[in-house]
Amino acid sequence: MSTKNKKNETSSCQDTSYLEGLFDFIDHSPTCFHAVANIGEELEKAGYQPLSEKAIWQVKTGGKYYVNRNGSAVIAFSIPPKEQKGFHIVAAHSDSPCFKLKELPELSVEEHYLKWNVEKYGGMILSTWLDRPLSIAGRVVFKTSEGMMTKLVNIDRNVAVIPNVAIHMNRDMNKGIEYNPQTDMSPLAGSIREKDSYLALLAREAGVDAEEILGQDIFVYNRDKCSRIGLEGEYISGPRLDDLECVYGGLQALVKEEPGSYINMLAVFDNEEVGSGTKQGADSSFLRDVLARIRSSLQLTEEKYQCMLAESFLISADNAHAVHPNHPEKTDSVNKPYPNEGIVIKYHGSQRYATDAYSEAVMKDICREAGVPYQTYANRSDIAGGSTLGNILMAQVSMNTVDIGLAQLAMHSACETAGAEDLDYLIRALSVFYRR
Ligand code: CO
């Protein structure tokens, strides 16, 4: 699609009405736990019934269900009333790179400052966390007469900052800095008067006593809200676009489409940013377990189930690298996507992206039917690049899989940038997939 055509489309008819919902979702999802809770709420509004992994399932044809694991991963599915040829699955991830607070998180400096003791979660761009308002959110676990209970917490105000060293104290500041995560990245959380207040802060938020809290997963998050930027609002800017943008797109498509002759599924995994190797990650049994339980509930024979898997298709949706305006040389010379120019199909010679000739053909066909443009991404052959969910999932449950994403800049920055039009493209394409 030419630049000229795009411009006309931007100012006239391109639908960006989903952005308000995306912004609201991201702003209210400071951590993977909040994202999964918000997904659950939206699923229930759309008639999806919650299932527990601890209870016997009685799922029925025509039913809509969802189940979460660890409060940070969720699989939703909608079963068509008549035939079930197989599974149509969209996978994405709930986590984003950030800082995690250590179990004993308070550090004092010269009896004046109180800092938080943090470590890296995922491959983040450290410098982007400096000099911006931060806060903390996550979950706490406490014991009740009914057993261990979990509550989400979010200190919903500007609390902390990681200040830069003044240029007067480091004249080499603009020559490139190596940040040490142990010594350079501790957020300043207040004066020393606040020492020993951490558990009380979480307890107040959770509505429990500080001494009741036995466990915690607490992360630092960027307080920036999502917004439109660009002279014509062409772009969106905000935290955690990777991968909450694809999560939101998958969710919108799932709840608005009735299944055709496949069981529609949305699988959102945690811990993609740290290798997926946890009980709630893509490399766990979660998807396989849910599929097996659907099989058992619907009383499908093993033979029928295997036939269904062979008929199934998975779209692994995780954002992709757009051409950088200051560094276009970082991308392959032709397989390079731009924001607002459609869904990115990702390719990798060594199969770190699962796309192959068959799955790319299916994806292109879906885009054509949806009237959505698509682009291609491959790493420069001398750059290693990243990996994602697709090929990891295939070690657990194997089916035809394509890796896609939306083009974005500054991946793994505290604040990322993407195209304002691409979410609509994603929802339209995934809707066609779910309708088939
Ligand atoms: Co990602």
Image (cartoon, helix red, strand yellow):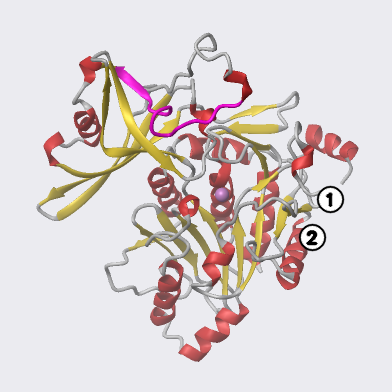
Q: Is residue 434 visible?
A: yes
Which image quarter is the C terminus in? bottom right
To which residue does mark 2 refer?
Answer: 368
What is the crowding at mark 2: few (fewer than 14 residues within 10 Å), some, or many (at least 20)?
A: some
Q: Is residue 258 visible?
A: no
- Horizontal arrangement in the rendering, residue 289 relative to residue 92 (left or right): left
Marks 1/2: CA–CA distance: 21 Å
Towards the viewer: 237 or 251? 237
Type of amino acid at the residue the image marks with label 1: Val
Helix, strand or loop under label 2: helix
Specify the quadrant of the image occupied by residue 290: bottom left
Type of amino acid at the residue the image marks with label 2: Arg
Helix, strand or loop under label 1: loop
Question: Which residue appears farthest toward the top when viewing the image?
Answer: 168
Towards the viewer: 71 or 368? 71
Q: Earlier in the sequence, mark 1 or mark 2?
A: 1
Q: Residue at x 39, y 79 (%)?
A: 297
The numbered disc on residue 390 is none
Question: Which residue appears farthest toward the left when viewing the image?
Answer: 145
- Horizontal arrangement in the rendering, residue 402 relative to residue 134 (left or right): right
Specify the quadrant of the image occupied by residue 324: top right
Q: Main secondary structure of the magenta part?
A: loop
The magenta-colored residue range is: 176-190
What is the crowding at mark 1: few (fewer than 14 residues within 10 Å), some, or many (at least 20)?
A: few
Towards the viewer: 166 or 374? 166
Specify the quadrant of the image occupied by residue 378: bottom right
- Horizontal arrangement in the rendering, residue 4 relative to residue 254 (left or right): right
To which residue does mark 1 refer?
Answer: 334
Depth-wise, is mark 1 or mark 2 nearer the camera? 1
Q: How far from the left and from the top, in percent, is residue 168?
A: 53, 8
Q: How far from the left and from the top, in percent, is residue 333?
A: 83, 48
Q: Residue at x 13, y 55 (%)?
A: 146
